[in-house]
Image: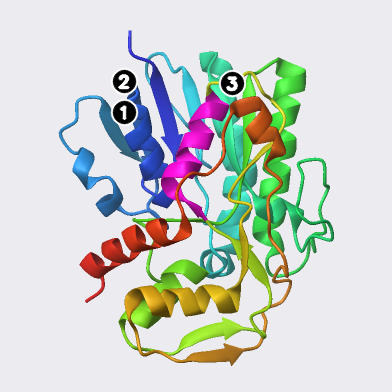
Amino acid sequence: MKKTCVVTGGAGFLGSHLCDRLLAEGCRVICLDNLLTGSIRNIEHLAGNEDFTFIKQNVTEYLYIEGEVDFIFHFASPASPIDYLEFPIPTLKVGALGTHKTLGLAKSKGAKFLLASTSEVYGDPLVHPQPESYWGNVNPIGPRGVYDEAKRFAEAMTMAYHRFHGLDTKIVRIFNTYGPRMRIRDGRVVPTFISQAMKGEDLTVFGDGSQTRSFCYVSDLIEGIYRLAMSDLNDPVNIGNPSEMTVMQFAREIIRLTGSASRIIHRPLPVDDPKVRQPDIALARRALGWEPRVGLEEGLRETIGHFRTVIE
């Protein structure tokens, strides 16, 4: 019998890649998405696949899935600063009500549950790199707080269901990830820089560009998530690439790989923008045998190639 997996946010960037992986593993996949930030384009290649079902659904509302469910992957949420600043209330609701509804579904079905959390739970960290034991440095009432606190609450709710109801739950803390199917205008640095470079526009660097980021290619991330789902771990696990670089270095790399003549200009640093974001992946290495494999240049070339097909 094929395992049945429910993926909320399954038409989003990460959710759609996860659907692909689960189908490749021989699972039946039910994708739920209200298309607030997801896109049918991300899953249109799955049309006609008898093992794939799409349901347009807001997961903060009543959830009903017929038949047995073996696993629920809760990936529904706006995930970029532009999105959660435009949709602050839906972001809070999907982290709170959406997590409650999906955990309730997992409980009623006796299904395993995996929460897509985020490195944003660490806020603007004071500890580098960030291990899972770090509690974070978060401004709960700042503009980014709607996303940070939604995910922190979602983690608390997930652990409560694990401890009180004995539900088999997993929590993945996702660090910066990039690859095909990212939205061009989602406000994150990878699609923004690539889009600007390909159009010959100035690349906008916030602050002096000395803030650092680490970038994990999407196939590596999905591999880590799949291994976590199949593991017996219940505590949060960081999945990301620990190789760190400054935003200025990244901007120059994008210009080089696209062959663009774009200049780099500077804008004021946004409120609560983290200065350093780097995962400690010792737990993932030890418990899952996982670490990123795809080099930055290889991953960026794949991503740029995708964007060439969608940028007019």
Which quarter of the figure is the N terminus placed in? top left
Check if residue 217 falls in the magenta segment.
yes
Left or right, 82 with reference to 56: right
Give the image location of residue 61, x and y in percent.
50, 40
Left or right, 8 with reference to 244: left
Instruction: Mark 1: give few (<14), some (14-19) or many (20+) Cα within 10 Å.
Output: some
Which quarter of the figure is the C terminus placed in? bottom left
The answer to which of 277 and 38 lies nearer the viewer is: 277
Left or right, 59 with reference to 47: right
Q: Are marks 3 and 1 in contact (CB under 8 Å)?
A: no
The answer to which of 289 and 21 lies nearer the viewer is: 289
> Extreme top residue here?
1
Q: Residue at the spot x=38%, y=53% of the render?
A: 38
Check if residue 109 falls in the magenta segment.
no
Disc 3 versus disc 1: distance between alpha carbons?
19 Å
Q: Residue at the spot x=53%, y=36% of the render?
A: 224
Q: Is label 1 in a helix, a strand or a loop?
A: helix
Question: Callout 1, which amino acid?
Answer: Leu
Residue 84's quadrant in the figure?
bottom right
Reading the chain from its start, which is encountered first: label 2 or label 3? 2
Q: Residue at the spot x=64%, y=34% of the render?
A: 284
Q: Which residue is mark 2?
A: 26
Magenta-colored span: 216-229
Q: Which residue is mark 1?
A: 23
Give the image location of residue 176, x and y in percent.
56, 56
- Dot label at residue 231: 3
Give the image location of residue 69, x and y in percent.
44, 18
Disc 2 versus disc 3: distance between alpha carbons?
18 Å
Q: Is label 2 in a helix, a strand or a loop?
A: loop
Reading the chain from its start, which is encountered first: label 3 or label 1? 1
Q: State how many labels appear.
A: 3
Residue 234's quadrant in the figure?
top right
